[in-house]
Image: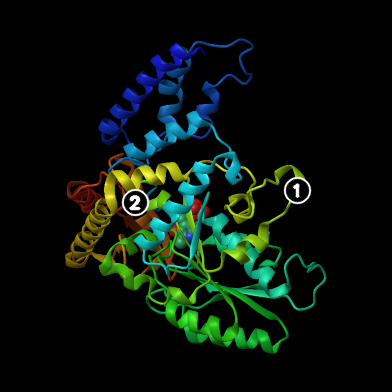
Amino acid sequence: MDIELFRRHGHEFVDWVAEYFKSVENLPVMSRVQPGDIRKKIPPAPPENGEPMERIFEDFKSHILPGMTHWQHPGWFAYFPANNSPASVLAELLTAGLGAQCMVWQTSPAAAELEETVMDWLRGMIGLPEDWAGVIQDTASTATLCALLSAREVSTGFGANRRGARDPLVVYASTEAHSSVEKAVKIAGLGAENLRLIPVDEHFALIPGRLEEAVAEDARRGLRPCAVVATVGSTSSGAVDPLRAVGEICRRRSLWLHVDAAYAGTAAVLPEMRGLLDGVELADSLVFNPHKWMLTNFDCSAYFVRDPGLLIRTFEVHPEYLKTGRDAVVKNYRDWGIPLGRRFRALKLWFVIRTYGVEGVRSLVREHLRLARLFRSWVEAHPRFELLAPVNLSLVCFRWNDGRKNELELSALNKRLMEAVNDTGKVFLTHTALNGRFTLRLVVGQRTTEERHVRLAWELLTSEAEKLGA
Ligand SMILES: *Cc1c(COP(=O)(O)O)cnc(C)c1O
């Protein structure tokens, strides 16, 4: 494609994205295609000769778009959000145009130094201790893996071979922890059988006393307690583990404490929500995802560590071909994580924070919290809906309950209710299980979600529930 064609289509695509932002509300939130529908439309073999962009773009609109689920829809209440913003999209375009591989300082000094600066900004924005350092990872799953790898290295000596060791390392997290913890334990070679899931209280938060008992029991059996992953804002219900109490146990027992705040970390930009991270100074690492609730295109996950030296010792290798004369005075982020090659992700974060300002981010998050509490008040006031978890953040867990005693029937009914509401195409909710109950989740976190969208979700829920003859 020649450059003038690129320019023409570039303008056209920016126009398309602008229209998409304006009109996404009119599309069904969840894609309605059936399995295999999209593959049927795409030729099984690649074209032998190049095709004009007009044709490719037409196919994008007719074949691809119907198979998209619209995460930027204001009726998005599912999973957790992955909100983007116009500023972030524009920065991604620049990043793609620059096409830089930002593995070491020399391969793009601006990328390295901007990353250092925006991570310092973020650290201050959520109130982490000033001597912590941050690095951008692709996802929270990767950051949690990095944390467990560092914890493993600290426990056993850097670079040690643990094969055949008789004293397995043990990792602890609550029964409500994200599945990425189990995945990280498996990948780190610690053995899935050495992950202890600690019981939670009636608010789905880890019980520190039970953690203490489990650690003591493992130590007694000759195992080596190694790390704890505390969750701030669990995926199922938004539960918050008591960081300070967990941190004190970790300090006493010399355990690595990693905080998974993938979704909830953003809320700590609000002074009134800082309590979420009370005790974080006792932790060793924390992850939160600007790509969830902070207006930054996926992917962008912020990983912070108390001691970057331990992170670097976990990952650094020094092949001759990557040595540069500046290694002693600059940050080479290839040593701060798993991949060598790195995208210039700091740019979009810089654009986002500058266009919104910290106060802009705060007011967005504050509004989402307000809307979630408003929705909670409707659930509480309704005779046949009930809350199933405390609303700590912008996530509400609830269900229809008309008093019938049969739990299986209630679960089936709530599943049908969720499907009926989602089938309207106007909103999208997902579910979880809490205490074995089918639980509807409504998360407010889309950039464009307003009170009228939350109201619409509620109206659809109540009217579909009546229709189901509940
Ligand atoms: C979303 C989420 C994750 C996983 O995040 P990725 O960035 O997709 O890996 C982990 N933990 C919690 C609590 C989450 O909400």
Report if residue 311 is visible in the image: yes
Point 67% across, 47% down: residue = 325
Residue sitting nearer the eye, 250 or 370: 250
Residue where numbered disc 2 is placed: 418
**Camera-nearest residue between 442 and 133:** 133
- Measured in 3D between alpha carbons, the distance from the residue under mark 2 to the one under mark 1, in whole angstroms, is 54 Å
For mark 1, what is the residue? 319
- Compared to residue 238, the image places residue 137 above or below, namely above
* Callout 1: SS: loop
What label does residue 389 carry, if any? none
Of labels 2 and 1, earlier in sequence is 1
Residue 33 visible in the current orientation: no
Figure quadrant of residue 127? bottom left
Q: Answer above or below: position of 175 versus 224.
A: above
348 or 470: nearer the eye? 348
Tell me the SS state at disc 2.
helix
